[in-house]
Image (cartoon, grey):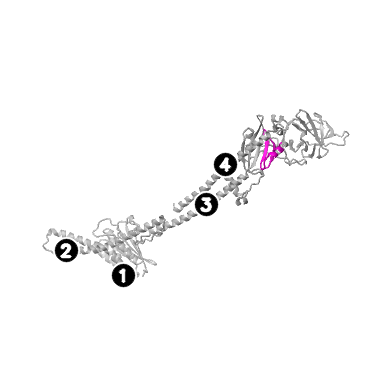
């Protein structure tokens, strides 16, 4: 993994800042939520005590508190209507509960009751395939055979009253008092306080009427009469439970601005509701002002999603679900609701209304939570924007720093790797040595190390010449002394063997000193050699014949092109290069082996190959075979080998603008040295 990648990964750790900010914002929001919930529960508790001080506002009759109410058994609930229904015989203005409520389905044809002000509104549909309208021309003034719908009520004192509804045609209704019991005879006098509309339907007729609430007792039954005046089914008086308009007025007096207060009975039916939660909440942040309900706000709400319930409560007939159910059980509670049903996000708190050691009802207080959401989103937006900007800035700066650092390291690495040229010369050019950081110190240390290594290498390269110069004079004295001693005829025979050994040793020393100074002499000769044009192929053929005649223990094959191969250079240096190559090949080739000299030419180069049978090149010398003082010989030889032969070959190849390389033969039988020379050598 590169240094740049590592620094990039380290810079990505700055992404922990937005995460930490998000965690902090969540904790802050949780604290604010708990504070708002506790405050709203205290407000609801105070309002509940106010309502408990006037229990008569909750129920029309005291018996309502003690008896169970169940619309599934035929009981009726009359909610407080928000608007006055238009008496037109249609039910499109009547509210539908926001969740399934027994007895109040949209397809239910049973009677519907509702209270608006001091009047009870009723809507009922009757199935009657043969509608009979009242004939106003009868002598008695009352037609006994028309289709009639009868209302039977029972007041709190156990007294029953009945009144019938008929019509002479679709349109206004006729309401008259009626006897209780079959045949339900009606009086001639109409009841002026009851008004309504009769509308014919495909299955019968529909009646929508309005009457004072005082005309309805604690129980009521609505049924149709047949032509003989008998009820089509046995009438059952169901409880009539209504909302309290007086309680709604009292709640409106105490409900603070921005709060909505509701009271439900012990079974969850809505008795009264007052106040409003339509408090606008706007953001000061320009991004959220432009995106009040769009992408950005949806992201923040998703980040803070707490799985708050958003199921409908059954309004306007009742309120069921948390926290109302918990409060009805005697446990105050507050929860949050996300926007749903056209309402903003809300905090809803519910507390029980206790009176005389019993729970009369439940008080619910709702407060808009949008302002807290806006504060939260403003804080989160600013926090995330700043942290993301800081993260992006940190990543950019880190990448720039990593690129600069990687560039300096690569430059330093290239300078160190190229400090030693292929020719074996030290040319250190270390960059950034003036920098004052750690890389600058490293560059200076490298520069000092390479400079000392260059001095040491230069010393080693000239050591042979110096030793040759210093040792040649005493060695010459020793050699001349041995020659004089050998000319003495009186030397004992036993000393002749020692004398020959000494003369052989001095000869080897002379060869070693000559080899040590040879490379230096070649370098000096190269500097002063003049170039001439000569035939490389002819030179190679002549030297090949000479080598074959001289080294008879091996087979030397020479292959050259037939045409003239001109080369601008030094034939003496080429001959010396061939001497070194043949000397090296003969030294490794076994007796009876083959050595091949081959010259090839292409469009721009000559390729001179000297191959021999014998051991392969050791892997550790790959790329170093042509350096000074490098030798691959492991077996002792009578001739001195200091690792300078192939170094001289490379020097001569460089002088002619060529290059030298060595490789093992493909069949593994030996080694080949390839010298590539340009046909037009540099001048």
* N-term-proximal mark, 4 vs 3: 4
At horizontal 60% and vertical 48% (from top left) the residue drawn is 297
CA separation in Å, label 3 and label 1: 67 Å
The label on residue 528 is 1
Looking at the picture, tell me which residue is in the foreground, 612 or 187. Answer: 187
What is the secondary structure assignment of the residue under circle 2?
Answer: helix
In reply to whether residue 275 is colored magenta, the answer given is yes
Per the rendering, the mark at residue 31 is: 4
Q: Does the stretch in magenta take in 60?
A: no
Q: Nearer the viewer, mark 4 or mark 3?
A: 4
Q: Give above or below for 359 relative to 445.
A: above
Residue 323 in view here = yes
Which residue is at the front of the view, 105 or 403?
A: 403
Of circles 4 and 1, the one toward us is 4
Viewer-nearest of discs 3 and 1: 3
Q: Is residue 106 left or right of residue 430?
A: right
Which region shows up in magenta? 247-276
Q: Which of the 4 image quarters holds residue 652?
A: bottom left
Mark 3 neighbour class, 10 Å CA radius: few under 14, some 14 to 19, many 20 or more: some
| Image: 409 above or below 113 | below
Q: How far apart are the alpha carbons under marks 2 and 1? A: 37 Å
Residue identifier under label 2: 481
Disc with the residue nearer the chain's start (3 vs 1): 3
Between the C-alphas of marks 4 and 3, the distance is 27 Å
Q: Label 1 crowding class (10 Å Cα cut-off): few <14, some 14-19, many 20+?
A: few
User: Measured from the top left, where is residue 526 in percent x and y?
Assistant: 31, 68
Q: Earlier in the sequence, mark 4 or mark 1?
A: 4
| Percent x, y of residue 185 | 83, 30
Judged by depth in the image, the label closer to the viewer, 3 or 2, is 3
The C terminus lies in which quarter of the figure? bottom left
Task: Give whichever of discs 3 and 2 has the lower sequence position.
Answer: 3
Using the rendered view, name the quadrant where residue 40 is placed: top right
């Amino acid at each position: 993994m590169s240094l740049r990648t590592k620094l990039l990964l380290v810079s990505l750790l700055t992404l922990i800042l937005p995460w930490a900010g998000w965690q902090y914002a969540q904790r802050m929001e949780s604290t604010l939520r708990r504070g708002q919930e506790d405050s709203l529960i205290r407000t609801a508790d105070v309002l509940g005590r106010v309502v408990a001080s006037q229990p008569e506002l909750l129920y029309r009759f005291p018996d309502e508190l003690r008896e169970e109410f169940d619309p599934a058994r035929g009981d009726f609930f009359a909610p407080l209507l928000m608007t006055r229904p238009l008496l037109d015989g249609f039910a499109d203005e009547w509210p539908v509960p926001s969740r399934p409520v027994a007895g109040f389905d949209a397809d239910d044809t049973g009677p519907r009751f509702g209270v608006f002000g001091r009047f009870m509104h009723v809507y009922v549909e009757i199935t009657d395939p043969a509608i009979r309208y009242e004939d106003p021309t009868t002598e008695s003034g009352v037609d006994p055979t028309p289709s009639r719908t009868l209302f039977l009520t029972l007041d709190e004192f156990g007294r029953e009253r009945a009144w019938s509804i008929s019509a002479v045609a679709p349109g206004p209704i006729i309401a008259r008092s009626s006897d209780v019991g079959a045949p339900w005879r009606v009086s001639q006098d109409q009841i002026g306080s009851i008004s309504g509309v009769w509308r014919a339907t495909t299955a019968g007729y529909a009646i929508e009427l309005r009457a004072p609430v005082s005309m309805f007792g604690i129980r009521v039954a609505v049924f149709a009469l047949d032509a003989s005046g008998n009820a089509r089914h046995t009438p059952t008086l169901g409880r009539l439970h209504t909302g309290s308009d007086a309680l709604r007025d009292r709640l409106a007096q105490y409900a603070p601005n921005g709060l909505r207060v509701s009271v439900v009975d012990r079974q969850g039916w809505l008795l009264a509701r007052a106040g409003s939660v339509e408090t606008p909440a706007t953001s000061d942040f320009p991004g959220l002002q432009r995106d009040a309900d769009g992408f950005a706000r949806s992201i923040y709400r998703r980040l803070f999603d707490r799985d708050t319930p958003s199921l409908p409560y059954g309004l306007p007939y009742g309120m069921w679900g948390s926290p109302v159910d918990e409060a009805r059980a005697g446990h105050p509670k507050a929860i949050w609701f996300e926007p749903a049903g056209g309402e903003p996000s809300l905090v809803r708190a519910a507390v029980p209304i206790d009176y005389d050691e019993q729970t009369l009802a439940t008080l619910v207080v709702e407060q808009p939570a949008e302002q807290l959401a806006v504060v939260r989103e403003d804080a989160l937006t600013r926090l995330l924007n700043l942290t993301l900007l800081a993260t992006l800035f940190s990543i950019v700066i880190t990448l720039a720093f990593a690129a600069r650092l990687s560039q300096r390291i690569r430059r330093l690495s290239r300078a160190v790797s190229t400090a030693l040229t292929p020719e074996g010369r030290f040319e250190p050019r270390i960059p950034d040595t003036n920098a004052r950081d750690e890389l600058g110190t490293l560059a200076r240390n490298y520069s000092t190390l390479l400079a000392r290594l260059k001095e040491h290498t230069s010393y080693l390269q000239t050591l042979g010449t110096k030793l040759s110069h210093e040792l040649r004079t005493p060695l010459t004295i020793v050699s001349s002394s041995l020659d004089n001693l050998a000319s003495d005829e009186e030397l004992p025979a036993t000393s002749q063997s020692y004398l020959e050994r000494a003369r052989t040793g001095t000869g080897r020393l002379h060869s070693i000193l000559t080899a040590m100074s040879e490379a230096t002499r070649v370098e000096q000769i190269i500097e002063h050699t003049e170039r001439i044009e000569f035939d490389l192929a002819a030179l190679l053929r002549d030297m090949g014949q000479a080598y074959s005649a001289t080294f008879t223990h091996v087979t030397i094959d020479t292959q050259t092109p037939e045409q003239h191969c001109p080369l601008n250079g030094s034939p003496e240096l080429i001959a010396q290069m061939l001497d070194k190559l043949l000397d090296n090949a003969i030294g490794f080739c076994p007796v009876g082996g083959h050595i091949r000299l081959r010259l090839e030419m292409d469009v721009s180069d000559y390729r001179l190959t000297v191959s021999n049978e014998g051991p392969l090149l050791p892997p550790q010398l790959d790329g170093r075979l042509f350096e000074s003082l490098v030798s691959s010989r492991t077996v002792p030889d009578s001739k001195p080998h200091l690792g300078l032969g192939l170094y001289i070959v490379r020097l001569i190849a460089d002088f002619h603008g060529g290059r030298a390389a060595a490789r093992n033969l493909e069949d593994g039988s030996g080694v080949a040295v390839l010298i590539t020379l340009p046909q037009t050598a540099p001048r």
